Amino acid sequence: MAHRRVSEEGTATRWAAGPLVTVQPAGEDWPGLRLEYVSSPGRPGDEQRVTRLVFGRVVQYAWGQFEFPLSLGNPQDSGFHLIEITDSELVRRIVEEGHFSHYPPGQRAGASVPEDELRHYRLGFDEHGYYDVVCADLEITHTTTSDISPYPG
């Protein structure tokens, strides 16, 4: 396995049915992706920790439903917490076969994202699925809330 846990309890997903996902479209800034989910034990109505992951300068992201996970390389690298895949087949393919692969080394992910800044993150949720994100920036913050049900029903 070629991955590392990004954080211990702070990014665990075992208490969340799935994340609230927000996509920032491309514009003046690069596309971004935000995932928010409950990351501590408790019951509805109790105050719990909510983890917010904001991925910036996103090159690619994907979601695979729990029973039908996407095959994006490194299938053995998974878990119910945030990991960084350190020897990513997906990053290698983006750099070697992607749109900018003919650029000089160091710029094969595009002129605005040096290829050595690309990171492949994976986050799994039981019974929900896995998110794979290739990006250059990641911000992790925590907050608390007593309303842990942003989803209807």
Image (cartoon, grey):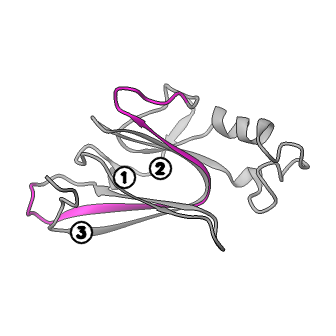
Residue name at image x 82 percent, y 48 percent = 100
Q: Nearer the viewer, mark 2 or mark 3?
A: 3
Do the residues under discs 1 and 2 have CB atoms within 8 angstroms? Answer: yes
> Tag 3: residue type?
Thr
Q: Which residue is mark 1?
A: 11
Residue 144 badge: 3
The answer to whether residue 72 is left or right of residue 36 is right
Residue type of the residue flagged with mark 1: Thr
Element type where label 1 sits in the image:
helix
Label 2 Cα neighbours within 10 Å, binned few <14 / some 14-19 / many ≥20: some
Residue 43, image x, y percentages: 9, 55
Question: Residues at badges 2 and 3 in contact (C-beta under 8 Å)?
Answer: no
Residue 108 sits above or below residue 143 on the image: above
Q: Earlier in the sequence, mark 1 or mark 3?
A: 1
Q: Is residue 62 above or below residue 117?
A: above
- Which amino acid, mark 2? Val
Q: Earlier in the sequence, mark 2 or mark 3?
A: 2
For label 2, the SS is loop
- Span of residues in magenta: 43-71
Queried whether the magenta region covers residue 11, the answer comes back as no
Magenta highlight: main SS = strand
Residue 148's x, y, as percent?
A: 18, 61
Tag 3 secondary structure: strand
Query: Position of 70 compared to 73: left or right?
Result: left
Report if residue 149 is visible in the image.
Answer: yes
Quarter of the N terminus within the rendering: top right
Crowd around label 3: few <14 · some 14–19 · many ≥20 (10 Å): some
Does residue 117 appear to the left or right of 146 in the view shown?
right
Q: Residue at the location (51% across, 26% down)?
A: 75
Estimate the spatial distance between the alpha carbons at disc 1 and disc 2, rounded to whole Å.
8 Å
Residue picked out by circle 2: 6
Residue 69 part of the magenta segment: yes
